[in-house]
Image (tube, helix red, strand yellow):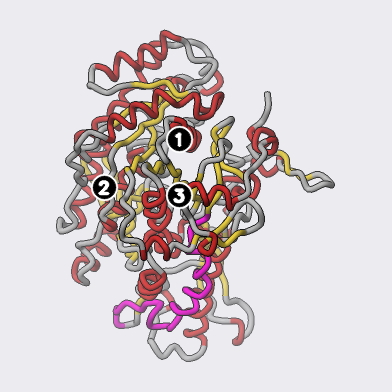
Amino acid sequence: MTSDIEIAQKYNKLPITEIAAKVGIPDEYLEPYGKYKAKIDVSFLQNDKTKRDGKLVLVTAINPTPAGEGKTTTTIGLADALNRLGKKTVVALREPSLGPVFGIKGGATGGGYAQVVPMEDINLHFTGDFHAIGAANNLLCAMLDNHIYQGNTLGIDPKTIAVKRCVDMNDRQLRKVVDGLGGKTDGIPREDGFDITVASEVMAIFCLAESVADLKQRLASIVVGYTYGGSPVTAGDLHAHGAMTALLKDAVKPNLVQTLEGNPAIVHGGPFANIAHGCNSVIATKTAMKLGEYCITEAGFGADLGAEKFFDIKCRKTGLHPSAVVLVATVRALKFHGGVKKEELNAENVVAVRNGAPNLIRHIENIRGVYKLPVVVAINEFPTDSESEIETVVDICKKFGVNVVRSSVWAYGGAGGLRLAEEVVRLCECKNEFSYAYRTEDSIENKINAVVQNIYGGAGVTYTAVARKRIDEFGKRGYGNLPICMAKTQYSFSDDPTLIGAPAGFTVTVRDVKISLGAGFIVVYTGDVLTMPGLPKHPAAENIDVDDSGVISGLF
């Protein structure tokens, strides 16, 4: 079978100028990075008040499993299908992190005949955005530690430092380190650690900023630590935000590439929805909406994480109003949620599909009942799916008044998503009463309870002493009216990754909370979720290689 990278390498890419011309981007606002990728200077859109926003469609999924769901593949294929229907459509995707690329996934640009290209570039260094984000973050950390070493005029208590250095790689060895060892000139010894770049507050700020000025203001608001008297110290207090913005001034421009069918795709901003909000940048989404009749975008992991944050953080803060939601599932994943082992998923098992379906149904109920949005279920087809299994999914969803559409975009590209595209067009014409899961003016505890009970299906929340103390402090400092960003395992509605399906009656434990003032939300840490993942026993990097002519192999 032809691999994803082989399919991508056979495609005759169009010059990026031709892709830009399809959506009316003038040459003077295009900044090419080689022949097939470019940055967009969006100022021409900001100056043009005549362009109306296109429809915004979110692609999300059930809770992920080792069987795979195909959310990005479906997103790209749907955009190609809409373009085949004559609907001017732009897809807006997240940039891949090198951690997952070299860890488990081996690439994050779609699959089969529903991909964005140049696949290798996007999966690796691309246009350097993540490197710029890491550099800006690490500059802040260097200036913070230097300030303390040079006399600490701000009176920062080193035991309260709230920012970590970062690297765009899964490296468990860096989770907990001791630095500043050596002589007097080598800094102040302290316990420290690294985050993966996509888990940094700078990444969240990058994705939520709407302009360079907004970016600079948000960077200045990052709380880096506290004084001995307990007052917060910010990046602005260290005078770091100007230089950080300088490092990010080019990165903040969205990246233009293309699908295998020669349609425009904007790839910009970070993933990692179990820590940050897990969506592409606001700038990318709004640009895509201005350039097309439809913008198809995605959010990280399952709908309990990515979609919840897309709605409750991204849409709330920007005024974005989605028109419809596509909920991706596979028969294989439903069987996994129904208790079938990974190695047995190819065998027909209608009972397991029924047993796993409650996971799908809860996501449907959340999208329709909590967020008041129309939804279609897209079954990402596998050759091993039986007709009985698919019909079981269709019958179950019909009882809830939700249509199920087969999607075969992996095998056939846009042609395999035409029925899905038609249903999305229909749903987008329906009026909706888009709402949120909670009010920002609610207490921090009430907002957490709302997500746990109404989205996850849990019974309640318990707090460690540390978390309770921080929540009280944030309330007193006036931070209580911020949205919350739940840091939770992606594999379960609960904070226990082993509780698959649709568990109920569980209690979520909040072990810590952190203020991300620049991003504009409070991070709520549950369970054992990590801000620096590790590599698996056999990382995808073992299979990646390059030959003498520079052709890369092994990316999925």
Quarter holding residue 63: top left
Query: Is residue 381 visible to us here?
Result: yes
Vertical position of residue 410 compared to residue 285: above or below? above
Q: Which residue is mark 1?
A: 83
* Residue shown at 32% from the left, 43% from the top: 55
Task: Write down the region rendered in magenta.
Answer: 229-255
Mark 3 or 1: the one toward you: 1
Image quadrant holding the C terminus, namely top right
Mark 3 or 2: the one toward you: 2
Query: Is residue 160 visible to us here?
Result: no
What x and y, as percent, mark residue 158?
Answer: 43, 77
Given the current orientation, which residue lies at the most extreme right position?
548
Q: Which mark is residue 546?
A: none
* Residue shown at 56% from the left, 81% from the top: 187
* Residue shown at 42% from the left, 20% from the top: 406
Dot 3 or dot 1, earlier in sequence: 1
Vertical position of residue 370 compared to residue 438: above or below? above
Q: Which residue is mark 3?
A: 272
Quarter holding residue 472: bottom left
For badge 1, the amino acid type reads: Asn
Secondary structure beneath dot 3 equals loop
**Front in this rendered view, residue 98 or 537:** 98
Vertical position of residue 403 compared to residue 486: above or below? above
> Are the residues at dot 3 and dot 2 in contact (C-beta closer than 8 Å)?
no
